[in-house]
């Protein structure tokens, strides 16, 4: 048995359908509410932003949604992605645990994000849309949508959180290579951005603010739709190709996970790996521990309130029930920019409420320490976001060592850190500080939750 569990990159090895956990949940998701009436929304309420095919997927309870042939044809450029046995890491830790990682860094943009970007671009093109707007934190999503846009002939406009725009200039360059335009958020290009800058000209931005800017521009033009890189049900569903492939690959290794781990910001890469395994458990399969790992500086699952909240700062979006720090919450500028969202995906939040997953939070320096150990043993430099999953996997392997248990640990290495070398330089120079959230700011943001949250 080789240490790399993969198979030939041919069409038969790529999933033919996305898995929809809504078919197997023991309790349905709470309804999405209209921001004005607070009544459950209908398809027409979302039509100004999304094509009807994606709206249908958002509310579907079908277990599997067929992946269109043009989307699978693009997936073939890098899927299936490899599953590795981390033997060198196991040896370094002297653990009896078996550690596997699914590596999504082999995609054209270096992360899991194209799995949904390609699908969303395809459906928007089919619906006659010419232009997409979006937000991005670390730039992984923005570069992925830019890539998908150029494949399907769509203009793409990206609002990138200002602190990441400054920290990660090469992500902006990648977006421009693929033909997109990228603006630091908050900006002067939208009313939402101008309002934030009037209040705080030095604002470092947030994903909630960037979403407000992207949604505002999409709503103003009939040829433009909005695309989101995480949080929504259809986005998480598109990522389940990750977990479905991992199940089959582990079968080739005659193994199955006891523990499944993923980092969580909005919830897409975590869900892509974990939901197929949770679904199998819900249908009577083997029980697994599923661990969602988040930054201590933006602790939505571990410190947030499970309540209805807006997805954006300007309160333009529908209200979803999720673990939230409040839509006005602005996290500090720690390097894992993809994990700086104030809310968690409704499906992930619901899964935690049902006891299907557990969550933990880590400081960024301990995550970088884990990332360096992983790099020196497994040869891949993880993105700052992915180091959170690495840290949890190492902690679980250490626990197995202490308890003398030979458990199987699976985590998602959702992206490479090739554009994040400044963060690693800061770490080695001792300039990488553990960022804490402002407790007073968090209290104020939670106090501003919409009234339905307390009903």
Image (spheres, grey):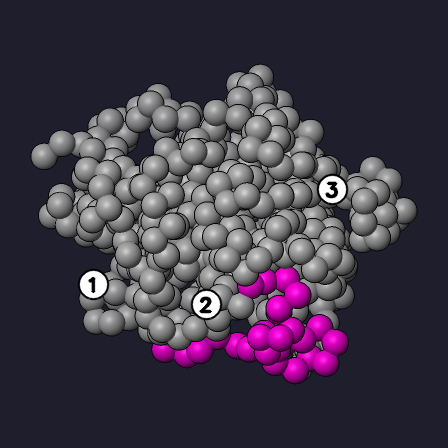
Q: Which residue is mark 2?
A: 57
Q: Which mark is residue 286?
A: 1
Seen at 62% across and 43% down, the residue is 155
Q: Earlier in the sequence, mark 3 or mark 1?
A: 3
- Kindly report the distance in space between the C-alpha atoms of the residues bearing marks 1 and 2: 27 Å
Between residues 57 and 252, which one lies in front from this camera angle? Answer: 57
Q: Are marks 2 and 3 in contact (CB under 8 Å)?
A: no
Q: Which mark is residue 153?
A: none
Q: Residue 3: within the magenta? A: no
Q: Quadrant of the C terminus?
A: bottom right
Residue 24 percent across, percent down from the top left: 33, 73
Residue 358 at least partly seen = no
Mark whose residue sits in front, 2 or 3: 2
Looking at the image, the residue that sits furthest to the right is 198
Residue 298 percent across, percent down from the top left: 60, 49
Residue 253 percent across, percent down from the top left: 13, 43
Between residues 406 and 134, which one lies in front from this camera angle? Answer: 134
Seen at 70% across and 60% down, the residue is 222
Left or right: 228, with 402 as reference point: right
């Amino acid at each position: 048995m080789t240490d790399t569990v993969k198979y030939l990159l041919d069409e038969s090895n790529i999933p033919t359908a996305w898995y929809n956990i809504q078919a197997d949940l023991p309790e349905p998701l709470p309804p999405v509410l209209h921001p004005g009436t607070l009544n459950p929304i209908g398809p027409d309420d979302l039509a100004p932003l999304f094509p009807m095919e994606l709206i249908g997927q958002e509310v579907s309870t079908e277990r599997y949604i067929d992946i269109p042939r043009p989307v699978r044809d693009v997936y073939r450029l890098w899927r299936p992605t490899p599953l590795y046995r981390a033997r060198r890491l196991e040896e370094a830790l002297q653990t009896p645990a078996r550690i596997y990682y699914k590596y999504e860094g082999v995609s054209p943009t270096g992360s899991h994000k194209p799995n949904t970007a390609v699908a969303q671009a395809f459906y928007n093109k089919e619906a006659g849309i010419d232009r997409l707007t979006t937000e991005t934190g670390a730039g992984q999503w923005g570069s992925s949508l830019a890539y998908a846009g150029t494949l399907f002939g769509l203009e793409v406009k990206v609002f990138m959180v200002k602190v990441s725009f400054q920290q990660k200039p090469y992500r902006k360059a990648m977006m421009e290579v693929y033909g997109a335009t990228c603006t630091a958020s908050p900006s002067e290009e939208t009313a939402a951005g101008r309002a934030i800058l009037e209040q705080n000209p030095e604002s470092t931005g947030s994903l909630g603010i960037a979403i407000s800017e992207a949604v505002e521009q999409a709503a103003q033009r009939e040829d433009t739709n909005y695309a989101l890189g995480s949080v929504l049900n259809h986005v998480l569903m598109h990522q389940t190709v990750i977990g479905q492939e991992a199940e089959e690959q582990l079968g080739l290794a005659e193994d199955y996970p006891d523990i499944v781990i993923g980092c969580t910001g909005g919830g897409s890469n975590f869900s892509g790996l974990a939901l197929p395994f949770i679904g199998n458990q819900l249908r009577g399969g083997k029980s697994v521990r599923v661990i969602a790992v988040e930054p201590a500086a933006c602790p939505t699952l571990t410190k947030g309130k499970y309540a209805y909240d807006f997805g954006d700062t300007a309160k333009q979006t529908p209200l979803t029930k999720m673990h939230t720090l409040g839509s006005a919450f602005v996290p500090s500028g720690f390097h894992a920019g993809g994990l700086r969202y104030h809310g968690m995906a409704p499906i992930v939040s619901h899964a935690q409420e049902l006891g299907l997953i557990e969550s933990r939070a880590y400081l960024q320096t301990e995550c970088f320490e884990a990332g360096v150990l992983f790099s020196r043993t497994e040869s891949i430099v993880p993105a700052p976001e992915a180091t959170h999953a690495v840290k949890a996997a190492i902690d679980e392997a250490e626990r197995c060592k202490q308890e003398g248990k030979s458990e199987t640990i699976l985590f998602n290495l959702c992206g490479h850190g090739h554009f994040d070398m400044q963060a690693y330089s800061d770490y080695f120079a001792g300039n990488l500080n553990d960022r804490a959230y402002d407790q007073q700011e968090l209290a104020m943001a939670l106090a501003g939750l919409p009234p339905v949250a307390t009903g």
